[in-house]
Amino acid sequence: MAYKFVAGLEIHVQLKTKSKMFCSCPTEGPDTPNSRVCPICLGHPGTLPVINKEAVLMTLALGKAMNARINRVSKFHRKNYFYPDLPKGYQITQYDVPLIEDGVFVMITGKKVPIRRIHLEEDAAKSVHIGSSGRLTGSQQILLDFNRSGIPLAEIVTEPVFESPEEVAMFVEELQATLRYLGISDAMMENGQLRCDVNVSVEVDGKEGTRVEIKNMNSTKAIRQALSFEYERHVRAYEAGVQLQVETRTFDEQSGETKAMRRKETSEDYRYFPEPDLLELHVTDELMEEANKYNGSFHEAYKDALTWLGREKEARALALNKEQFSVFKALVTKGGDIKYVSRAVLIELPNMLSEEGKSWDQLNESHLSSIIDLLTQGKITMAVARELLWQTVRGNDPLEYARSHGLLNAGATDLEAVVADVLAKNPDVVEKYKKGNTNVLSFLVGQVMKQTKGTAKPDAVREVLIKRLSE
Amino acid sequence: MKIGDIFERRQRGELTFQSIMELTLNNLEKDELLHAFLYKRPPEELMKEAQQADALWDQGIRKPLQGIPVAIKDNICVEGLPCTCGSKILENYVAPYDATVVKKLKEAGAIIVGKTNLDEFAMGSSTENSAFGPTRNPLDTNLVPGGSSGGSAAAVAAGMSLLALGSDTGGSVRQPAAFTGIVGFKPSYGAISRYGLVAFASSLDQIGIFAANTMDALLGAFVLFGKDPMDSTSTEIPIGPEPSQHNVRRIGVIKELSSLGLQPDVERVYTQFLNTLAKQYELVEVSIPHWEEALAAYYFVAPAEASANLARYDGVRYGSTVEANTYWQSVRMARSLFGDEVKRRILLGTFALSAGYKDAMYDKAQALRQWLIYEFNEAFRTVDIIVSPTTPNLPFPIGAVSDPVEMYKCDLFTIPANLAYLPAISVPAGFTGNLPVGAQFIAPRMQDYKLLSFAASLEVR
């Protein structure tokens, strides 16, 4: 039998607005539970929602980035259900006429992912289940934090066009980058800023399979694991002739497996009806224009990265990391040699940053730029550059450091003298070399480099050493 | 005494706001029997505020409702005061914020006397559905004052406040005004912010004003009107503190109403009222073919919205909390605190929105609503204003009407204005014995100022 993986996504993205979707509570601030709440987001009697314009602008920007149709008039509905994290007993969301419809997301692979719709809604409170399985039923206590209640969410729904777990993960990575370049969400999966529900099925000889929804994947790695596990589970079931259930499953990071959460025997009746507390949402030309302030583009970044790096995989990796890309771009823009910029930004700095526990945005770009300048002008060697990069990562002024440590005269030292000195100090090593053990050369190079504090160019050192040793 | 007269006499030194408050406090002793209030502020606080109002006046400070005692229906939030909505489920609820109308009243210098009784969550036409006992009609204490804003109507009718706020979803201001012989004004939908009014049916709810006369109602409207950034459905509607030229010439009399079963006494007083009107205005018959069906549409739309609006009362965050082992149990127990009428409407509304029934009920009711709006628009092409009785019946004895549908019919004449977002006012049309009959005037949307100016001109005459 021929099996084919099929998946479609529903992605909730917390928008990075200053205030919540329908009230003026701040979206960021102290994490103290229930410190960013008001009568509106607590669902007190008599309160009314007011649409956050910025959330609308951000969603419009996303729609534009996906070449989607923007509904100039859209509506909000009430989705009715009881749950402790839902203070009004209904969620205000968009239903029959969402803000955005029919877009396309073009992946770096060239695959076109049709976007069915993007709509605006409000987040629920965060509930912490104390005791038992972490679920509502059977838990001893439920603690509710309404700081999250009312955070604006954009829900993105794709068509079911994904053909492998890897493709899903790559799409999510590129979507995260897109959101970050636009500046409309930090899209971190591990803290719930981006939540991805995947509808998976496995086609058997072209015949549609049983559809299962997978939730609770907190990283793109988890997406890869969960969907691969699920694919294999389905294939095994079909092979064994076991009937799969239509259900919602949750991914368990510990075991790397998905587990049944709830059956979907009947579709729940949410009794949607138009939200009478809000007017229809009219997208004016002015709003369309204003939305253009969110205009950063992942795809543009990728194009730049490809021009610099030439290889698609490296270019994608660089473009996916907005902060890293931005440092790279700044250095190239200031005239840095791509070769040196690549070495510094792609190889050296990532390790240094992770070792120092720092992030890209903490780097001083003008310091970096001057290091690259020195390299490009041949005034320092790569070894010195590394030392200077360390200094800038640690927050020191690298130029200052280089000057005070006499590191600025690459090749200017009297190599001949240093070489003579090193050879004189290491007669036993010289002896070995002369007996044919040429491996010891690198030791001698190292000794010379050490004495010149790295300012010497290794090639030149090698050349002089060989000349003197063969005399 | 009109509020305008109070200010004039205050200016001449013939009275003080403290003397007005003393009079009010005297009248409030009647509340022992009437039970118009669910919460009364302490007399010393009220006297202190009256004293401050006098002091400010003496300093030359003038505010539109300075020193005027005002009563607030107990479904409108006043920061720090209880807001029970006449329900056990909110018995312990203290509002943490001021409704926009309350903010405006305070800024205008009004003195809030207390919170008035109502049918639970404003669902009812007699104030008998209050979980805390009925209010009595000041004109005859055996009778209901109407509802759902019966407490506010009784407060004004008994001189326990000069103005009172109510909410009108299907007639809950106009009908009790008619039953207590005072003026009840429901503005155009959106004229007054609903922020802080506990929602019953959001697309129909509108805060309304009770007053002893139309001039006072107009003054109240002048203070309360205006677009509110906290209520997206509010709009700017022109209004002034004094009546203006109204230019009303032709008054529409609704053709379909003759068949709707008016009580004979009501019909007699109403006919006399029309005859008087006819001396000065041209009465023209107009047709609103779906007037009667509007009642049916209302009883799908209002409960549907109510079913969602009342979902927040789950006993988790505020109000009456219950001891239960699970969340679902606590929801069930808390919600069993609702009274029968509220439960009935939640069930009806949930049903009307349910898959398989929504098309035939909620959606059809919305379509009917659109028809009704169209028919009013057509009628207003030939007349400036429409007149009808406010209610088909006279105030009835407490406990006399037990069939819910009979009760619903009390609102037969008032519901269409809510469905069509129109401004409407009930004014006293006359008496039969000691019982009042109200007449209702309805104007085109946004023409609240014309409506009030016209009604005020009837009183001057």
Image (tube, grey):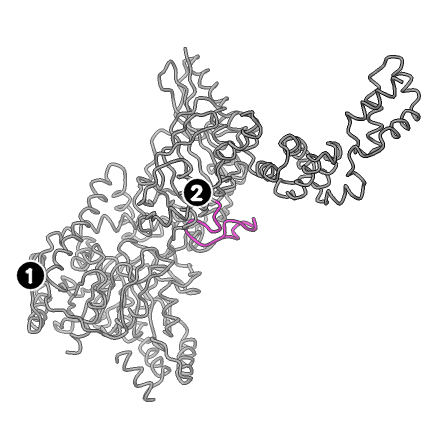
User: Nearest the camera: B60 or A217?
Assistant: B60
Q: Position of residue B196 (x, y in %)?
A: 37, 60
In space, the residues marked 2 and 1 are separated at their CA atoms by: 53 Å
Say which mark, if any, is on residue A153.
2
Residue that extends furthest to the bottom in the rendered view of this protein: B13
Chain on which label 2 sits: A
Say which mark, if any, is on residue A328.
none
Residue at 19% over, 54% down: B403
Around disc 1, counting alpha carbons within 10 Å, would you say few (fewer than 14), some (14 to 19), or many (20 or more)?
Answer: some
Q: Is residue B205 above or below residue B441?
A: above
Q: Quadrant of the C terminus of chain B?
A: bottom left
Q: Is residue A445 visible?
A: yes
Q: Position of residue A79 (x, y in %)?
A: 35, 42
User: Nearest the camera: B273 or A324?
Assistant: A324
Q: Quadrant of the N terminus of chain B?
A: bottom left
Chain on which label 1 sits: B
Please say whether residue A33 is one of the residues in the magenta stretch. yes
Looking at the image, residue B79 sits to the left or right of residue B258; the answer is right
Q: Amino acid at mark 2?
A: Leu
In terms of secondary structure, where does tag 1 sit?
A: strand
Q: Which quadrant of the view contains residue B153?
A: bottom left
In terms of secondary structure, where does tag 2 sit?
A: strand
Q: Is residue A90 visible?
A: no
Please say whether residue A359 is one of the residues in the magenta stretch. no
Q: Is residue B453 above or below residue B359?
A: below
Span colored in magenta: A16-37
User: Nearest the camera: A116 or A468?
Assistant: A468
Q: Amino acid at mark 1?
A: Glu
Q: Which residue is mark 1?
A: B285
Q: Position of residue A269 (x, y in %)?
A: 32, 37
Discs 2 and 1 share one subunit: no
| Secondary structure mostly seen in the magenta stretch | loop
